[in-house]
Image: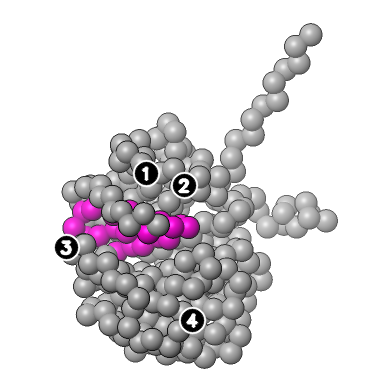
Amino acid sequence: MALPQPKLQAPQLPQHLLRTLDCKQGAVRAVRFNADGNYLLSCGSDKTLRLWSVSRGTLLKTYSGHGYEVLDADGSYDNSQLCSCSSDKTVILWDVATGQVTRKLRGHAGKVNCVQFNEEATVMLSGSIDGTVRCWDTRSRRPEPIQILDEASDGVSSIKVSEHELLTGSVDGKVRRYDLRMGQLHVDFVSSPITCVCFSQDGQCSLSSSLDSTVRLLDKSTGELLGEYTGHKNTGYKLDCCLSNKDTHVVSCSEDGHVYYWDLVEGSLSLKLSVGKAVVQSLSFHPTEPRLLTAMEGRVQVWGAEPEDTQEEAAI
């Protein structure tokens, strides 16, 4: 007798507001999970970077050293270092425990939009409105970058690092993928200014959002367009997009106060999550769990797949 196939459980989407953090940093320009998802970083227009506990919603440390608003940040895999970038044209490497500036790197000719560590945190990569990506050695005291990638003909808005690959999005409408091991460059032309890029979890695809209110999924090796996701509004702001932790859904900020979830394969809208009345400026998906961070004005929201009290009961 054939047994009935077990029903596949539908992936849970973060849609329950667990807590709101009033960051008191002016406008929050970006919000980021750390490598294990236990902490979050908020980048403020008041020139500060703040580290928070996600589960408790408590402020752990404030990092001050930039001369203008902080635009992006990243944490190292071992949680010992942070990097941040700012409109003041600098990239800063921080010691997490002491809150001290380890290195302050100058070289970009304009505001620095994005920054990320490589996996071993031996290199920081920063992308700027000056059209360059600069690679900085975190272990040496050299003030100049070890490499400058200047292929973009306009500002670099987003960068993502994965093993030996670097993905960049630029205002010139092009998604560039650098194979650092092979020394190769692959370019996909989207035609509208790119606001955010990221890799899929399985490393086979790239996702990009652009100012024509469209998020596109591209096959990494061929450049083939696999999916387009629309319905949200993104025409004037640098907004984030990402994939859920299991690559089941595409997630995007929107200028209409919502976060949009689309089914990756079908392209249909799965959920339109209301965050508030302003622009959802930034978002970050938890590396392993259905948790989402959103930033709107001066606050950060933490979202879960289930309300908090049921999660705590399940843990008991």
Q: CA distance from mark 1 to mark 4?
A: 31 Å
Q: Which mark is residue 153?
A: 3
First-in-chain label (3 vs 1): 3
Residue behind mark 2: 203
First-in-chain label (2 vs 3): 3
Residue behind mark 1: 220
The verdict on residue 209 being magenta is no
Residue 45: quadrant of the picture? bottom left
Secondary structure of the residue carrying numbered label 3? loop
Report the magenta residues as a range.
Answer: 157-180
Identity, as a three-letter code, of the amino acid under mark 4: Arg
The secondary structure making up most of the magenta span is strand
Identity, as a three-letter code, of the amino acid under mark 2: Gly
Residue 3: quadrant of the picture? top right
Q: How is the image coloured?
A: one colour
Foreground of the two, 302 or 103: 103
